[in-house]
Amino acid sequence: MPRVRKGAARTQQKARLRKMTKGYSKSRTAQRGEMKQAIRSSGWYAYRDRRAKKRTFRALWITRLTAACKMRGTRYSVFMNGLTNAGIALNRKMLSEIAIADPVTFDEIVKKALAAAKTGAKAA
């Protein structure tokens, strides 16, 4: 049986690996084992950090809302409880954007939330 050397297939595989490791440094672009390890690690980091990004942004929005609430003489927790009681269904991202871009509207939202927090009755 003749010996098979995988010439074209091996070259194509190396080309695929090189394309995936473009921009990496040193042996991560030259040696096949290092290339595979670099690709695997970068995949793990990308997967992990797609989730971490969501946590980071939520923390940013909460920090912004806390600062905006303090400027209006209330606390973040009281404000969020008031929003729930008032039946205002705005997420933290939109609330933080409103607080920055349109302070007058945010003032109105805070007033409604505080009024609902004082009564304590949930809106239907």
Image (cartoon, helix red, strand yellow):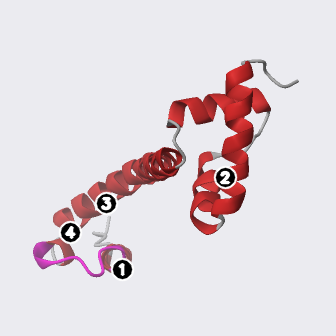
Rendered location of residue 103, percent (x, y): 63, 61
Seen in the image, is 54 located left or right of residue 123? Answer: left
Can you name the residue that lies furthest to the front here? 73
Task: Give the extent of the magenta segment.
Answer: 19-27
Seen in the image, is 95 located left or right of residue 50? Answer: right
Residue type marked 3: Ser
Residue 19 image label: 1
Residue type marked 2: Asp
Magenta stretch holds residue 13: no
- The residue indicated by pointer 4 is 32
Tell me the distance, in whole angstroms, between the alpha carbons under discs 1 and 2. 53 Å
Which one is earlier in the sequence, the residue at label 1 or at label 4? 1
Which one is earlier in the sequence, the residue at label 3 or at label 4? 4
- The residue indicated by pointer 3 is 42
Magenta stretch holds residue 24: yes
- 110 above or below 49? above
Q: In the structure shown, which secondary structural element does the residue marked by tag 1 occupy?
A: helix
- Tell me what residue is drawn at x 27 percent, y 55 percent: 41
Residue type marked 4: Arg
User: What is the tally of numbered marks visible in this picture?
Assistant: 4
Rendered location of residue 84, percent (x, y): 71, 30
Residue in front for this viewpoint, 118 or 50 = 118
- Tell me what residue is drawn at x 66 percent, y 44 percent: 110
Q: Quadrant of the C terminus?
A: top right
- Tell me what residue is drawn at x 60 percent, y 36 percent: 79
- 101 above or below 18? above
Residue in front for this viewpoint, 56 or 76 = 76
Which one is earlier in the sequence, the residue at label 4 or at label 2? 4
